[in-house]
Image (cartoon, helix red, strand yellow):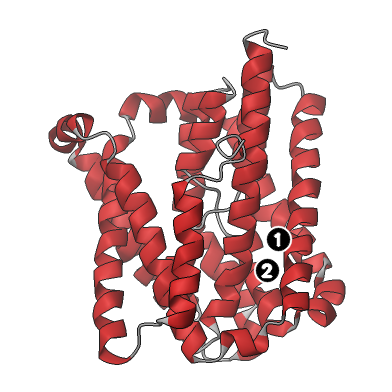
Amino acid sequence: MLKMLALDRFTVLLFIMVVLATFLPVSGQAAEIFGTITTVAIAVLFFLHGAKLSREAVVEGLMHWKLHGVVFAFTFALFPIIGLLCKPLLVPMLGQELYWGFLFMCFLPSTVQSSIAFTSVAQGNVAGAVCSASFSNIVGMFITPLLVSFFILGESTHNFDPTASIVQITLLLLVPFVLGQLLRPYVFPYMKKMPKIVKVFDQGSILMVVYGAFSSAVVAGLWQQVSAQTLILLILACSVLLTLIMLLALYVPRWMGFNRADQKTIFFCGSKKTLASGVPMAQILFIGQPLGMIVLPIMIFHQIQLMVCGVIANLWSKQSRGVE
C-alpha cells in the first residue's frame, strides 16, 4: 500500500529534512558553505539529466508538437490563470507570503523524472513525455522568472530585474544540461554502469535544498508564522488545485482526439510541478523574501501529486495489461 501511494524512502527523508531543519537548522557561515555545496550538487544533477536524455528521444518527441503544445498550455497558462483567479480566496485564508508561494508553484515547469516514470508505468507515450517534460523545464527557466516578476515581485519591490535572475538560472540549470547533452557519448556509458546515480543526485540535491531553505526559514521564525490551521488550509488548497487540473488533463485530451497513450502523457506531464527546479529558482528569485513560506506550497503539492499519480499509474498499468 505504501509503495502504491508513492510513500517511499524519499518521501520519508523529505519529511525528516523538515523536522531536522526545525530542530537543528544550519545557520551563519555553515549555511553559506552548505549552500555552495548544494549549488554544485544541483548543477551536477542537471548535467546528468542532459547526459541521460537521448538524441533519438528528443527528435521523436519534437515531432509531436500538438502534444507538447497542450502540455505547455496546462503548465504555463492554465495553472497560472487558476492561481491568479484564486487570489481573493487564498490571501485571506493563507496570508500574502503563502499565497505568493502558491502562485510561484503555479508558475513552475513540470517535473522530469517522475512524469516520465509514471507515463512509463501507465504505458503512455514515453518519448513524448521525455521531450515534453524536458522542454517544459528548459522553457521554464525563462518563463517562470518573467511570471514571478510581473505577478509576485512587482507587488513587493520595484528593483527586481528578471534578466539577472534568468542569467543565474541559466548558468545553474541550463548550461549544465546542455553540457551534459554535448558530452553524452562520453558520459552515458558510465551512467549505464551506475543506473542509480541520477536518482541519488536528484533526491540528494532536493533534500539538501529543502534542508537549507527550511533552516533559513526556521531561523527567521517560519513556524511562528504558519499555524496548524493555516497548514491544513494550504494542504486543502493544493489538493483542490490538483484535482481540478487532473480532471481537465483527463478530459481535454480526449475531447481533442488524442490516442490513449498520448492522453496518459498529457495527464502526467501537464498536471505536475517540479520541486527539483522550483526550490533552486526560489533561492535566486526571492532573495530577501520569506523563502520557507515560498517553497512550502510546492513541497506539499509535490507530495500530493506523487501519491495520486502513483495510484493512477498503477491502475492504468493494470488496465493496459487486462488485469481486473
Q: Is residue 295 above or below residue 44?
A: below
Q: Is residue 16 visible?
A: yes
Percent coordinates x, y for residue 239 in the rendering: 75, 55
Residue occupying the point 49% across, 55% down: 12
* Residue at 51% in and 53% down: 11
Query: Looking at the image, which is closer to me, 42 or 53?
Result: 42
Crowding near the residue tagged with mark 1, few <14, some 14–19, many ≥20 C-alpha atoms within 10 Å: many
- Identified by mark 2, the residue type is Leu
Q: Quadrant of the C terminus?
A: top right
Q: Residue 113 appears at what percent x and percent y? A: 45, 41
Question: Image check: 143 left or right of 311?
Answer: left
Q: Which residue is denoted by mark 2 in the rendering?
A: 103
Rendering quarter of residue 302: bottom right
How many residues crowd mark 2 within 10 Å: few (<14), some (14–19), many (20+)? many
Quick check: can you spot residue 63? no
Helix, strand or loop under label 1: helix
Q: Nearer the viewer, residue 56 or 43?
A: 43
Q: Is residue 285 above or below residue 306?
A: below
| Dots 1, 2 in contact, CB < 8 A | yes
Q: Quadrant of the N terminus?
A: top right
- The quadrant in which residue 295 appears is bottom right
Camera-side residue of 316 and 163: 316
Viewer-side label of 1, 2: 2
Using the image, tell me which numbered label, if any, was put on residue 80: 1
Q: Position of residue 61 (x, y in %)?
A: 47, 28
Q: Earlier in the sequence, mark 1 or mark 2?
A: 1
| Residue farthest to the left, as pictured | 186
Which residue is more in the foreground, 59 or 286?
286
Query: How far from the left and from the top, in percent, is residue 42?
Result: 32, 60
